[in-house]
Amino acid sequence: MDHAARRNRLSLRLSDVGADAFLVTRLPNVRYLCGFTGSNGQLLLTPGGGVFLTDGRYVEQSRREVPDLRREAYSGEFVPPFAQACQDLGVASVAFESAGVTYGTYAQLTATGVALVPTGEEVERLRRVKDPEELDALAAAQGIADQAFDIQVAKLVEGVTERQVALDLDVGMRGLGAEGSAFDTIVAFGENSAEPHHRPTDRVLARGDVVKIDFGCVVDGYHSDMTRTVAFGAPPDQLREVYEIVRQAQAAGVAAVRAGVPCAAVDRATRDPIIGAGFGEQYRHPVGHGVGLEIHEQPWLRQGNDEPLPEGAVVTVEPGVYLEGIGGVRIEDMVAVERGGGRVLPLTPKELMVL
């Protein structure tokens, strides 16, 4: 991945934000700009290059992962070496990530005498558009999720618990080559599937349950995110009806995805048919979000967001209907935003599967 080109794109924003350098502290953004995968690192970026800061645990790792920047290792807080780097580089003002600096760290940075300029999601906006290597990693993560789902669904039996299925799925994805799970896997049986973000319990699987599984994995730092709802035996008639409504709404959302379309238009494409069917109050969340180095990132597909979808983004389309005490249905795909439309990444079918 061309980290230098990414850093150059960010440095071009310095004149607009009115600073001599950027201080990048959010780890996904640090990784995006220089390739560092450790748990502690900061990047002071200037038009001419910059300095990567980390602690002594990561001297060797940063030498391998960040070979094209000056590196400084420290013990304790990063603020003293930051101040020294600013002095060495002649930096008088620094733009920092408002969402990545605590008040305590802000106070320490202020005490160095360097002028601080708060910024919003400058790096996150760059990250919306994926380069070919990022798209390959996302596709690989989705491919593992597809395989793991097929394996897991074939193993569903009466008496298994939500926790057991979630654990087995997580282990299965690792066995297929994933670095780990993309987030806490959601497995919900029967009435529990009416909770959009249910946490797995010891509730056992029984005939007639719907099974909602929301999961993903990580490959090369990039996440996958997919939801499927299946029926374990014949589901209640109302949930069978709801499933078809959600399936059609999800298809309408996917069809609405294309470069330049307002984010809110995708949400509306899924919401209108669900409202028309009388379940608008039971659709309780936005339709989707971007996916990449973080499981939830820009762009945000929700009501009121009229920003156009950028070509090269990867977003989720995940409408759902949730009936308290009965169950719920959600169907979710990752979709690559292309000029001519959306390209669905999962291969797993979306027709109702009755086991």
Image: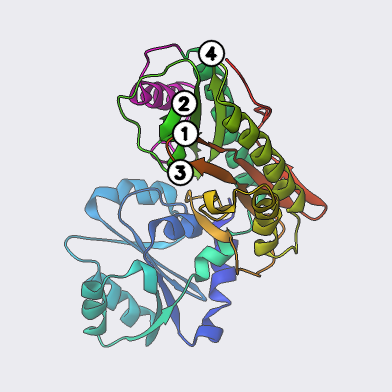
Residue 173 - label: 2
Q: Nearer the viewer, mark 4 or mark 3?
A: 3
How far from the left and from the top, in percent, is residue 110?
Answer: 25, 84
Q: Nearer the viewer, mark 1 or mark 4?
A: 1
Asked which secondary structure carries label 2, the reply is helix
Name the residue rendered at 34%, 79% in the picture.
86
Instruction: Give the Cα distance between marks 4 and 3.
Output: 24 Å
Q: Which mark is residue 154?
A: 4
Q: Which residue is mark 3?
A: 196
Tell me the quarter of the picture where residue 9 sits.
bottom right
User: Tags 2 and 1 in contact by the CB under 8 Å rule?
Assistant: no
> Which label sits in the foreground, 3 or 1?
1
Magenta residue span: 157-184
Q: Are marks 3 and 1 in contact (CB under 8 Å)?
A: no
Circle 4 or circle 2, nearest the eye: 4
Residue 143 in view here: no
Q: Quadrant of residue 135?
A: top right
The residue mark sitting in front, 2 or 1, is 1
Mark 2 → mark 3, Cα distance in angstroms: 22 Å
Say few, some or many: other residues with alpha carbon within 10 Å of mark 1 (under 14 / 14 to 19 / 20 or more): some
Q: Amino acid at mark 3?
A: Pro
